[in-house]
Amino acid sequence: MGSLILSNTGFWVNIVAILLIAVIIYLKTKEFSPKEFLIQIGVTSVLVFISFNVFFSFNKDLVREEIWGGTAQSFIKEEGYEEEYDCSYEKCDSDGKNCRTISKTCERWISEKRYINTSNKTKLSLSKQEFYNASRLFPTIEKKVYRASQTYQSKLKGEGDIWISTPNTKVWTSEYHTYENLVSASKYTIQRRQTHSEKEAKIKKEVLPYPVITYTKLGKFDFDRFIGSASLNADIRKSYKKELKILAGVLGKTKQINPMIYVTNTDDIKFIDKLEIAWRKGNKNDSILILHVDSSFKIKHTDVLSWAKDVAYNENLKKSMMGKNLSNVKEIISIYENEIKSTWVRKPMSEYDYLKGDISLPMTYQLLIIFINTLANIGLYYYFLRNRERRS
């Protein structure tokens, strides 16, 4: 986010405004020191940077969520415990002079934590029930932990021990990972979407929505990568869901890919254009294989919606699937897997860095930042003034 902010014209307009306000204040009140001048510029500049960062994070076109596949390495419960900490404070006379440090020790409660350690080096939160389910399914051990700051006056509430439940079978996980999509947040893309907003609303009714991660009895990490064709046999659908979950778990991290299959019986060979609009080009690690099938589930047309760096990946995958039957799960998944291993390379978002200067905050946000900036300058001015009066 930092490089995006530094590429934004609005940010530098605010920085120039900070310098002008500070210069005007200190030219008119020459008794202020250069140190105070620099502090005012530094504090307000940091405040502006933070403001831009916060407001950019609200931009759903910019901050997108891709899906990472992986496995659960362990289910963890860290019991709550009570600890002592230093809460000493400074006390001064009413005139702000003769300050001294008052030593004090306080106690606080550290709440219980429950989470999954994944193969992606991330943590997924768990409820009490979900951890309980895992501890019943998998071997679980209790690990005693010693902390120098910990007190043992609240044993009934928790002693700070760690419980580790380790799966003895593969538990495939999916999780959201935020990233900056410079393409979907660019001015051209937004203007185009606004121009065709009515068309987009109509298309969304013809296309199934992008799937979401749902709960299982072991946590929120289930993601269905097989979309469409409700008439397909339930067992076959279940097999596709499982195989794609495994494929994402095995290759997701190393190949930076989220493999999906969208099945449709439409004769519209431009269906990919509708899916691209409705799903906003998908996410940067998505590989969406679109299979057009007939009544016997024979594949009659294929397309691929992806951010592949080499178009050969899309073309090879399309050709390899033609004439196959959707009922043959192993064959379809095998072709998909081999193509990912041999030709898939995700196009890096850094190739779109030239769009950073084209992404800006709405005028309302920029005016709000200027207002915050002005208040901060005035506040610091009076703080320094009051501080000087105390010392004199």
Image (cartoon, helix red, strand yellow):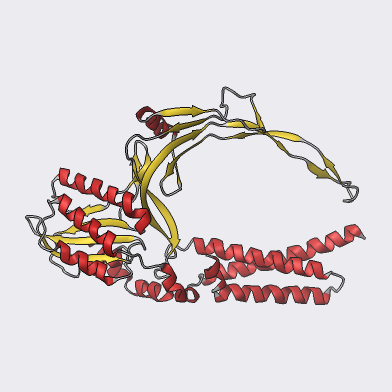
Q: How many marks?
A: 0
Q: Position of residue 284 (x, y in %)?
A: 36, 63
Give the left or right position of residue 297, taking residue 310 as reference. Answer: left
Q: Is residue 230 visible?
A: no
- Give whichever of 238, 169 is nearer the camera: 169
Left-right relation of 212 to 80: left
Asked if residue 289 lies left or right of residue 71, the reply is left
- Residue in the image at 30% along x and 71% along y: 310
**Direction from residue 235 to residue 99 in the image, left or right:** right
Q: Position of residue 175 (x, y in %)?
A: 39, 49
**350 to 57, vertically: above or below:** below
User: Which quadrant: the C terminus?
Assistant: bottom right
Which residue occupies the foreground of this view, 135 or 7?
Answer: 135
Q: Looking at the image, can residue 352 be seen?
A: yes
Q: Residue furthest right?
A: 392
Question: Is residue 170 positioned above or below 336 on the image?
Answer: above
Residue 383 position, x and y percent, is 79, 61
Picture residue at 32% right of the left edge, 50% below the top: 250
Point 78% across, 73% down: residue: 25
Q: Nearer the viewer, residue 335 or 355?
A: 335
Q: Quadrant of residue 314?
A: bottom left
Residue 62 percent location from the top left of the image: 44, 65
Q: Residue at x 59, y 67 (%)?
A: 368
Front one among 194 and 314: 314
